[in-house]
Image (tube, helix red, strand yellow):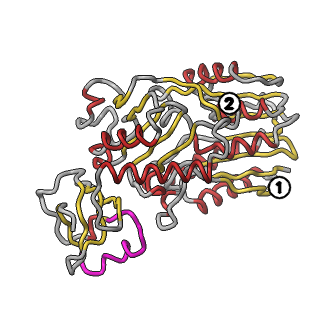
Amino acid sequence: MTSYNTLKLRKGKEISLDRKHPWIFSGAFGFIPKELKNGEIISIIDYQNDVLAVGHFQEKSTIAVRVLSFEDKVIDLAFWKQVLAKAQKYRFENVILNLKITNCYRLIHGEGDGLPGLIIDIYHDIAVIQCHSQGMYESKNDIATALDEIYALKLDTIYIRTKGTLYDSESENSEASKSGQEGIWLKGAKDETMVLENGHSFTINVVTGQKTGFFLDQRDNRALLGNISEGKSILNCFCYTGGFSIYALCNGATYVQSVDISQTAMDALEVNLAANKYKGDHLSITANVMQFLNDESIPAFDIVIVDPPAFAKSIHKRHNAVQAYKRLNISALKKVKPGGVLLTFSCSQVVGTQLFYDTIVAAGMESGRTIRVMKSLSQGADHPVNLFHPEGHYLKGLVLHVE
């Protein structure tokens, strides 16, 4: 038995562990000792004192423990090397088919890779880490060492991004926030690199960019758009740095308009346009997307894409988010030519697949148009969902044919 401090489950609460769910809620324990430190590794025992799991303890949280192993296992550097190497093997053998044309991907997707609270994205020669629990943050040095070793020292930079996590600028515990930074350099200090995604070039800034620098979860959906873009006019709303726009143009779209409210994103889009070869016309528009879509002078397009930021990050904001998705899609449908296509997405985890679908149905009914579902979309395979943790499925999308 490992020498970690223990937390004892109430009798009958071991069922979720039997089902391999990686979260243990605070109500599963009859008593939580005050001496347990936030983020420490602990052993979970049942009423017979048998060890069922090992995980990170999170104080003052509904999720009291995030499970790292369903065995009595020591969590040391060897553990991190083993689990990261396993995740790397999965990507190389099952997801990334040709590293010569795609060298950016998600290496660790939290619960989907058995590491709740941890995100690691690879951008060619830069690794970006996000920690969404105290325990993962405390383990950052071992994680970085393991990363460096499994990539055979080929990573120029390992950066832990604190903005947008538990350790953002408002956190007193963040080393980065104390120094006025948005992250910590664990190796090197390179903030920008150029990557390839299916042969298309993108410049990524891991310090100033959204999330870890790019929306890697949309790779397969961008490729799908590319397959239907030839000869089409396309409107890309919430375009960010132009992922969908680049794919469309490089696959024969005749005209693309890209709209986003962020001038910083639009400046990055121009850099990405210059790095790729295409023949079609492109127009960048810095504007509020909803106001833009409601402008009656804007013409209709063959294909419209709406990929907004998360409208809700908590359950109590879900209703307002649903109404926002409905209004957005009603407006977007008005900009689709007869016989055209709408690609619509939601990355709000609290808006489930069925609720998102029902919301789009409501928008479709109000639009008065005949609409068919061509395909349901999701996150890429490098963002796997643990079968026993459906909460890991967050990106929903639909491809709609609009009469």
As for residue 14 lying within the magenta part, the answer is yes
Local SS, label 1 = loop
What secondary structure prevails in the magenta region?
loop
Q: Residue furthest front?
A: 152
Toward the viewer: 50 or 358? 50
Looking at the image, residue 355 lies above or below residue 301: below
Looking at the image, residue 212 lies above or below residue 389: above
In the picture, measured across the screen, residue 168 lies left or right of residue 298, that is: left
Q: Residue at x 55, y 21 (%)?
A: 264
The stretch of residues the image draws in magenta is 10-24
In the picture, measured across the screen, residue 27 lies left or right of residue 389, that is: left
Query: Badges 1 and 2: C-beta atoms under 8 Å apart?
Result: no
Toward the viewer: 262 or 140? 140
Q: Residue at x 49, y 55 (%)?
A: 350
Q: Residue beneath label 2, please? A: 292
Q: Counting residues from the N terminus, which is met first, the one under dot 1 or under dot 2? A: 2
Q: Please tell me how many numbered marks the rendered image carries.
A: 2
Local SS, label 2 = helix
As for residue 388 lying within the magenta part, the answer is no
In the picture, measured across the screen, residue 109 lies left or right of residue 4, that is: right
How busy is the neighbourhood of tag 2: few (under 14 within 10 Å), some, or many (20 plus)? some
Amino acid type at circle 1 is Thr
Amino acid type at circle 2 is Phe
Q: Residue beneath label 1, please? A: 370
x and y percent of residue 215 in the render?
57, 39
